[in-house]
Image (cartoon, rainbow, N blue to C red):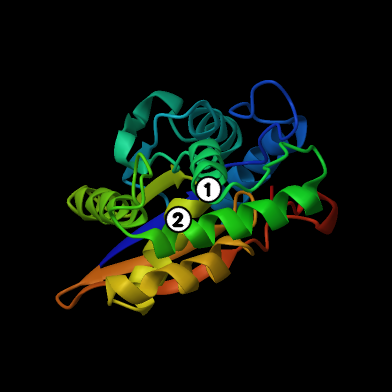
Amino acid sequence: MGVLLLVRHGQASFGTDDYDVLSENGWEQGRVLGRWLAEHGPAPASVVHGGMRRHRETWEAIAETSGLDADAAEIDEDWAEFDHLGVLARYAEATGAVVDHTTDRRAFQEQFEVSTAHWYDAGPDGGYPEPFDAFVSRARAALDAATARPGPTLVVTSGGVIAALAALLVVPDLAAVGPVWARFNTVIANTSVSRVVVGAGGARLLTFNEHPHLPRPLVTYR
């Protein structure tokens, strides 16, 4: 039986010119996770991360304190997050809603949840550059590729991808995944670990959103 450790990236730089950069908190979250993995295991036989900068930097922070080789990771672009700015823009275009790219986290979260609900309800003909169904299928392809790697496998990716896989593994009916994905996606902590076991019966979700390595002041969700 193989095990995949799906790690959400550390806190990114919300409200700045470049979101795709870890904040100081994000770097520390990664280092704390690295120390925790070194103590509790399992030691990964392979590592893969998405192609975004926040994925790479989270892996570098983990490697810094875990004793793992920072150069050992491979990149798989299928682990990339969905384009949340594109989703917000298309929602505004489709509905006439005014989307304010506010730096207020609560206000942004409300806009985000309404926009993503429209995204997954719109279906493949909703005009989104990457329809929700295509996003979930891409995440599933990334999972399938990771299961072929020597295990245990550590994957650094984004919260939306992990939530999509968790929802798909719990509710295999693709048409019903959207609302379940939304609930998972709102609660997943930065550098949390979700475990997927792979056996003769396929992939199964073992745990979701573990973050015992983080002291309370380091727990963030965006």
Determine whether 164 is above or below 60 in the image. below
Residue drawn at the location 36% of the way across and 42% of the way down: 79
Residue type at the position of mark 2:
Trp
* Element on which disc 1 rests: helix
Mark identifier at residue 119: 2
Determine whether 90 is above or below 37 in the image. above
Residue for badge 1: 91
Residue drawn at the location 14% of the way across and 75% of the way down: 200
CB contact under 8 Å: marks 1 and 2: yes
Question: Residue 77, located in which quarter of the rendered image?
Answer: top left
Residue type at the position of mark 1:
Tyr
Question: Residue 3, located in which quarter of the rendered image?
Answer: bottom left
Relative to 149, 160 lies left or right = right
Closer to the camera: disc 1 or disc 2?
Answer: 1
Question: Residue 130, located in which quarter of the rendered image?
Answer: top left
Mark identifier at residue 113: none
Q: Nearer the viewer, residue 41 or 172?
A: 172
Which x, y percent locates residue 92? 57, 44
Q: Nearer the viewer, residue 9 or 60?
A: 9
Q: Nearer the viewer, residue 215 or 13?
A: 13
* Element on which disc 2 rests: helix
Relative to 30, 102 lies left or right = right
Which x, y percent locates residue 32? 68, 45
Residue drawn at the location 47% of the way across and 61% of the way down: 163
Residue 6 visible to the viewer: no
Residue drawn at the location 64% of the way across and 61% of the way down: 211
Question: Mark 1 or 2 closer to N-term?
Answer: 1
Mark 2, residues whose alpha carbon is within 10 Å: few (<14), some, or many (≥20)?
A: many
Which x, y percent locates residue 181? 47, 66
